[in-house]
Image (cartoon, grey):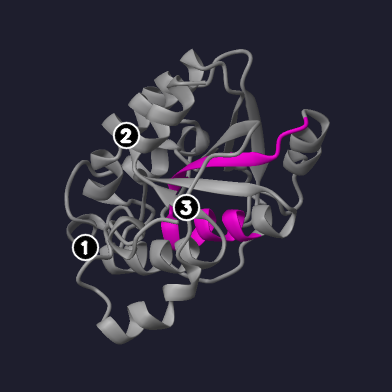
Amino acid sequence: MASKEEFENHCWQGLYSDEDYKTYAPFIRETCIGKKPAVLVIDLYNLVYKGGSHPPHEITEEFPGTCGKYAHEAIEPTVRLLESCRSAELPIYYVSGQFSENRVRSTRRKRAPLIESDYEIHDAFKPLAKDVIVRKERASSFFGTPLLAHLIQNNHDSLIVCGESTSGCVRSSVVDAYSNGFHISIVEECVFDRSEIAHKVSLFDLHHKYADVMHLSEVIGVISSR
């Protein structure tokens, strides 16, 4: 079994008390990637990169959908992840929002006017012809989409997850994947949020309950050795 130091060696270091770590000690285990994984790329569309690599609070008035610098910092590691997954011939499923004037809205929060290209995948991660693109209107990649049918039909037992936002669409997708019986590996350097604290707290919670949070180097090491 992994040691506490190994299991908790992630971005939430310093955020929790010794009492918290004692409470969660029974959750410590070895992390892994499943036997037949697929890659799930969540919401890496143009909208979240708008405004450039600035702190989100500085640009959110003009670009309320942006994740600012956190989105841009994750580009390079995500490119590395996808290149490694393609080299290992792992299937890649892209999930993105559905552009429509009549798109379902769940809240009345401020939104800038959208254009169709806002929900297109960012140029750094352009899908290939063989990749599957799934469109959604809610937070979860599974709700009201054919994603589960694709995964079952292709006999996948697990997912390698990257994308955004950690506390929103990533979290809801991971919980639904777990509920449907999949093992989930979240690549820490390849998920992000507009809030650093929400990102860290969400990863801590998911790691101890529903998924294995793993570093990019670990994930690449595993898939390249198979």
Q: Residue shown at 47%/49% (left/top)?
A: 31
Q: Is residue 157 left or right of residue 80?
A: right
Q: Position of residue 155 (x, y in %)?
A: 77, 32
Viewer-proximal residue, 151 or 41?
151
**Which residue position holds label 3?**
30
Q: Is residue 152 magenta-colored?
A: no
Extreme-front residue of the structure = 1
Q: Amino acid at mark 1?
A: His
Q: Amino acid at mark 2?
A: Ser
Q: Is residue 107 left or right of residue 65?
A: right
Instruction: Return the disc, 1 or 2, that comes first in the chain's sequence.
Output: 1
Number of the front mark, 1 or 2: 2
**Which residue position holds label 2?**
217
Q: Residue shown at 44%/20% (left/top)?
A: 224
Vertical comparison of 100 with 169: above or below: above
Vertical comparison of 84 with 4: above or below: above
Q: Residue shown at 40%/61% (left/top)?
A: 203
Q: Is residue 172 magenta-colored?
A: yes
**Which residue position holds label 1?**
57
Q: CA distance from mark 1 to mark 2?
A: 30 Å
Q: Amino acid at mark 3?
A: Glu
Q: Is residue 163 left or right of residue 134?
A: left
Q: Position of residue 213 (x, y in %)?
A: 43, 52
Instruction: Return the disc, 2 or 3, that comes first in the chain's sequence.
Output: 3
Q: CB under 8 Å between callouts 1 and 2?
A: no
Q: Position of residue 57 (x, y in %)?
A: 21, 63
Crowd around label 3: few <14 · some 14–19 · many ≥20 (10 Å): few
